[in-house]
Image (spheres, rainbow, N blue to C red):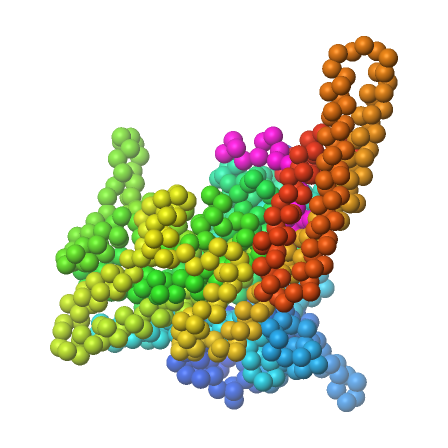
């Protein structure tokens, strides 16, 4: 029997590389610890006078855990992460080594900002930028082979104070929704609640391929997806991968990922096979929105690093393989108060249910008013190939409540109340040896972009490669807007002397009638829904560029400015960056496709034609019936080659002509001309792939790629 290696238990290593509340309490004086906790909870502004003491404790802890450098860690607008490492160890005036990390280092740093995307708000020579400590997200250590780096979550600003990161907008959005949620609770008389927090759990779908095979394909190396490739005989049609036994090689990788993330305080609650071959998923537990967004970036970075160590190629692209399910990043979200109560949890208690319905209906109201912002938040290059493909929700934003909650809302709209509407039931399996199974109040509607799933909403439209800070910011913004309008209506009724419960029921009734247009309980893939959505007037955009345009809808701009989440100038810059990102991503795909055709596919077809012609010529003089069909087969290969040559030349010329246009026209040309042309090229290449000798094929095909055997 082979020996097994002993691994540390998760509970023994959990959070060991995080400077969390436990470490702070142990290492900081009591008054400083309490000051810092008050700042983290939003009860008071951070006192810069405590920075030196906190920095000293943080440095000693980091060095004791092997760290040699520190860095402010932030999220630029390119949706990646960034860090500039500075060594702890320097030397004094006598040349002796000295470890230094001061309060001012902790509070603020000045990394070069010239090469980060800014949306045209600054010139390249305007290089100064500021990163500033975000104390609400704990510092952590990223280990390396020869030490480690203390990473300090931070915001990132330009010299003039303009945000150059995602976290700043996220923090503004969470503050907007949390303060308005607090007001709602106070209107209901809940005076003991100290704060409300937006909470998020981001599921992460991904593909894993054998790295040596995958790296032979330029499209996977440079685009993260396949641009060419015929479907294999067995893809996902057998429906035997989903929730199946995790392959041994993948399980070893997953276990390493979970162990490394546990040290960083990230708890991956579930892991499993997804629908497509070689597709998998991790799901972390819920946590505060800001921390959840930081942790999702850590999850992705850790997965990338360990995939290389396991000789695996990790794909986060939303649609790596044609004809197979793509990958999403479902963002589950809710609100939680300081007493640990989930504000989206239904109850059999009448009063609590009225509070629940108030928060629920206010969110739906915000969605009905600003669906364009949510659509804009998921308008990414990869989602162009995924959304609406009967594997992901359609581009049309709608909300699904499930029969139980929908009936509660209908009862209130019709003049009744919600009493008794939330009774749970059990499922009788007719098997006395098994316990009763408590049934949820509704099924999960995988076709809906926004589905209520029992005690939270699930935003299913975000793509797997996205930073969840963008959709989370949008979700918090629309909820804050909905809460603000709800609170005004409720407060006006209370000020007239109405009982808060009665006033709330009337307000829920009013806003529920106003948000009917966005609610849909059926199959969002159906043609009937498309017709109905058109009738309701809720189809906002049909393409990614049109979706990005929704960022600049006048009512959305006004709302975001009013809530203090974006200034108009900041939103214009963000819009430009999103549009540029779309153009750059598809431009790369156009170039790579052309290279793959000319460098690989065309020479391969030529070799196949020579092979076929040589074999056929050997039969000249022999009276074998059907030889003429052989000739027509050779003609088919030759025609495919000529068509590919012509169309790839057209693609190159189109790419060159589009580059001369402004960014918005460039983006429009991509969706109307470039993408259809690339689809034509792919159809031709894929149609001849099955006739090419394995000996001549320049790239591993789908059959070989979608196998994780050694």
Q: Residue at x 75, y 39 (%)?
A: 642
Q: Nearer the viewer, residue 97 or 237?
A: 237
Residue beneath the point at 49% across and 77% down = 568
Q: Quadrant of residue 363?
A: bottom left
Q: Residue at x 82, y 33 (%)?
A: 607
Secondary structure mostly seen in the magenta stretch: loop
Pinpoint residue 571: horizontal percent, then vertical percent.
51, 73
In the figure, is residue 620 to the left or right of 19? right
Q: Give how far across and how far down residue 230 sits, in percent.
A: 64, 36
In this rendering, the answer to whether 564 lies above or below 419 is: below
Q: Quadrant of the N terminus?
A: top right
Point 64% across, 56% down: residue: 586
Residue located farthest toward the top when viewing the structure as drawn = 623
Report the span colored magenta: 215-239
Q: Is residue 232 magenta?
A: yes
Q: Please name whichever residue, 394 or 197, is drawn nearer the observer in this view of the structure.
A: 394
Q: Quadrant of the C terminus?
A: top right
Q: Nearer the viewer, residue 550 or 662?
A: 662
Q: Is residue 639 above or below residue 645?
A: above
Magenta stretch: residue 530 in it?
no
Question: In the image, residue 503 lies at what x, y percent?
Answer: 17, 69
Residue 107 appearing in the image: no
Residue 239 vs residue 108: left or right?
left
Residue 559 place in picture, x, y as percent: 40, 74
Asked whether the viewer can see residue 565, the reply is yes
The answer to which image quadrant residue 13 occupies is bottom right
């Amino acid at each position: 029997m082979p020996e097994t290696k002993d691994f540390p238990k998760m509970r023994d290593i959990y959070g060991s590389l995080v400077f969390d509340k436990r470490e702070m309490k142990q290492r900081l004086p009591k008054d400083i610890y309490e000051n810092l906790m008050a700042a983290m909870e939003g009860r008071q502004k951070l006192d810069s006078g405590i920075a030196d003491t906190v920095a000293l404790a943080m440095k000693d802890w980091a060095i004791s855990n092997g760290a040699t450098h520190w860095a402010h860690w932030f999220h630029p607008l390119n949706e990646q992460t960034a860090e500039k490492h500075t060594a702890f160890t320097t030397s004094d005036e006598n040349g002796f080594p000295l470890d230094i990390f001061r309060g001012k280092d902790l509070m603020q740093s000045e990394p070069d900002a010239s090469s980060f995307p800014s949306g045209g708000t600054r010139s390249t020579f305007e290089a100064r930028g500021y990163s500033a400590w975000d104390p609400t997200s704990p510092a952590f250590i990223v280990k390396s082979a020869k030490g480690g780096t203390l990473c300090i979550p931070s915001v990132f600003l330009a010299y003039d104070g303009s945000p150059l990161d995602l976290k700043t907008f996220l923090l503004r959005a969470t503050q907007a929704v949390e303060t308005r949620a607090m007001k709602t609770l106070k209107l209901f008389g809940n005076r003991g609640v100290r704060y409300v927090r937006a909470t998020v759990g981001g599921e992460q779908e991904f593909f894993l391929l054998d790295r040596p095979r995958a790296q032979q394909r330029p499209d996977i190396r440079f685009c993260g997806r396949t641009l060419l490739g015929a479907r294999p005989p067995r893809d996902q049609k057998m429906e035997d991968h989903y929730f199946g036994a995790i392959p041994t090689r993948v399980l070893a990788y997953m276990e390493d990922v979970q162990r490394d993330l546990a040290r960083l305080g990230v708890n991956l609650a579930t892991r499993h096979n997804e629908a497509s071959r070689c597709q998998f998923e991790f799901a972390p537990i819920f946590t505060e929105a800001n921390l959840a967004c930081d942790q999702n970036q850590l999850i992705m970075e850790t997965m990338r690093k360990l995939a290389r160590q396991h000789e695996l190629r990790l794909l986060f692209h939303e649609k790596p393989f044609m004809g197979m399910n793509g990958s999403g990043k479902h963002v589950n979200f809710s609100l939680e108060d300081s007493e640990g109560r989930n504000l989206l949890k239904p109850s059999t208690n009448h009063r609590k249910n009225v509070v629940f319905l108030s928060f629920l209906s206010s969110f739906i109201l915000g969605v009905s008013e600003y669906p364009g912002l949510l659509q804009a938040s998921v308008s990414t290059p990869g989602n162009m190939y995924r959304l609406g493909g009967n594997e992901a929700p359609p581009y049309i934003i709608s909300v699904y409540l499930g029969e139980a909650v929908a009936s509660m809302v209908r009862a209130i709209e019709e003049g009744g109340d919600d009493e008794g509407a939330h009774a749970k039931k059990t499922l009788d399996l007719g098997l006395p040896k098994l316990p009763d199974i408590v049934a949820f109040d509704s099924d999960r509607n995988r076709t809906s972009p926004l589905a209520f799933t029992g005690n939270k909403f699930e935003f299913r439209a975000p793509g797997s490669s996205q930073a969840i800070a963008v959709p989370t910011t949008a979700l918090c913004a629309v909820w804050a807007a909905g809460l603000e309008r709800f609170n005004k209506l409720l407060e006006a009724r209370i000020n007239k002397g109405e009982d808060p419960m009665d006033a709330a029921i009337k307000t829920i009734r009013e806003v529920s009638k106003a948000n009917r247009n966005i609610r849909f309980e059926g199959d969002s893939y159906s043609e009937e829904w498309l017709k109905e959505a058109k009738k309701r007037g809720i189809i906002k955009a049909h393409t990614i560029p049109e979706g990005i345009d929704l960022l600049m809808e006048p009512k959305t701009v006004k709302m975001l400015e009013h809530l203090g989440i974006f200034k108009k100038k900041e939103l214009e810059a963000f819009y430009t960056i999103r549009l540029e990102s779309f153009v750059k991503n598809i431009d790369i795909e156009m170039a790579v496709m052309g290279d793959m055709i000319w460098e690989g596919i065309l020479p391969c077809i030529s070799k196949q034609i020579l092979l076929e012609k040589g074999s056929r010529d050997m039969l000249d003089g022999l009276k074998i019936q059907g030889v003429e069909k052989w000739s027509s087969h050779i003609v088919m290969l030759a025609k495919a080659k000529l068509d590919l040559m012509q169309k790839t030349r057209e693609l190159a010329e189109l790419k060159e002509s589009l580059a001369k246009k402004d960014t918005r026209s460039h983006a429009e040309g991509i969706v109307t001309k470039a993408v259809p042309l690339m689809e034509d090229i792919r159809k031709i290449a894929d149609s001849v792939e099955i006739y090419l000798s394995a000996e001549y094929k320049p790239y591993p095909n789908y059959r070989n790629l979608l196998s994780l055997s050694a």
